[in-house]
Image: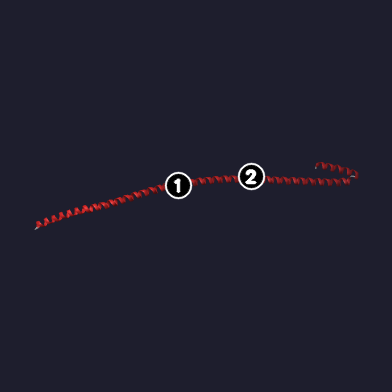
Amino acid sequence: MEHGIVLESVWVAVGFVVFVALVWRKVGAALGGMLDERSAKIRADLDEAQALRDEALAELKNYQRLHREAADEAKAIVKAAEATAVRIRETAEKKAVAAVKRREQQADAKIKAAEASMVAELRDRAASLAIATATEIISSKLDDKTSLALVDKATAEIEKLN
């Protein structure tokens, strides 16, 4: 009996192996198809991911280029603004210096006009005082005829001065 059990076990093992081989052939083909499908899907996903990555890198480079250009433009604007500020400051300084000189000249002109006015007024007063004093001295020491001749002579000389 032991020999029969071993023989039966061998036939059961051979049947099992044949069954597994047949099932493997059918299931293996289906399983291989499923794995091929999954592999193709994964490959497509990887290709799409690579394309998206490349597109993102291109956009990043474009953004970086735009950022550099904007930074360069901002630097140029700042430089132009600084140059304009310097020109405005220089112009303002020149205008201020010119205004100060103009005011100094106006003040000098006013001072000279006031001096001239004062000198003229002092001359007029001195002349009036001299005439009044001379008239008083002459009229007190001279007779009428001589005094009139002197007054006429002095008046003529004063008129020549003016």
Residue plotted at (77% across, 45% down): 120
Q: Amino acid at mark 2?
A: Ala
> Coloured how?
secondary structure
Disc number for residue 38: none
Residue labelled with disc 2: 98
Q: Are marks 2 and 1 in contact (CB under 8 Å)?
A: no
Image position of 53 (left or right of 138): left
Residue labelled with disc 1: 66
Image position of 160 (left or right of 53): right
3D distance between C-alphas at marks 2 and 1: 47 Å
Q: Amino acid at mark 1?
A: Leu
Whether residue 143 is visible to the viewer of this picture, yes or no, is: no
Say which element carries label 1: helix
Image position of 120 (left or right of 86): right
Residue plotted at (83% across, 45% down): 131
Residue plotted at (64% across, 44% down): 98
Image position of 32 (left or right of 101): left
Pick whichever, 41 or 108, lies toward us.
Answer: 41
Pick whichever, 20 or 87, lies toward us.
Answer: 20
Residue 54 in percent (x, y) is at 38, 47
Residue 127 in percent (x, y) is at 81, 45
Residue 82 in percent (x, y) is at 54, 46
> Upstream in the sequence, badge 2 or badge 1?
1
Quadrant hosting residue 84: top right
Quadrant position of the C terminus in the picture: top right
> Which mark's residue is nearer the viewer, 2 or 1?
1
Residue 94 in percent (x, y) is at 61, 44
Say which element carries label 2: helix
Residue plotted at (15% across, 55% down): 15
Quadrant position of the N terminus in the picture: bottom left
Q: Is residue 2 above or below residue 154?
A: below
Neighbourhood count class around disc 2 (C-alpha, 10 Å): few under 14, some 14–19, many 20 upward? few
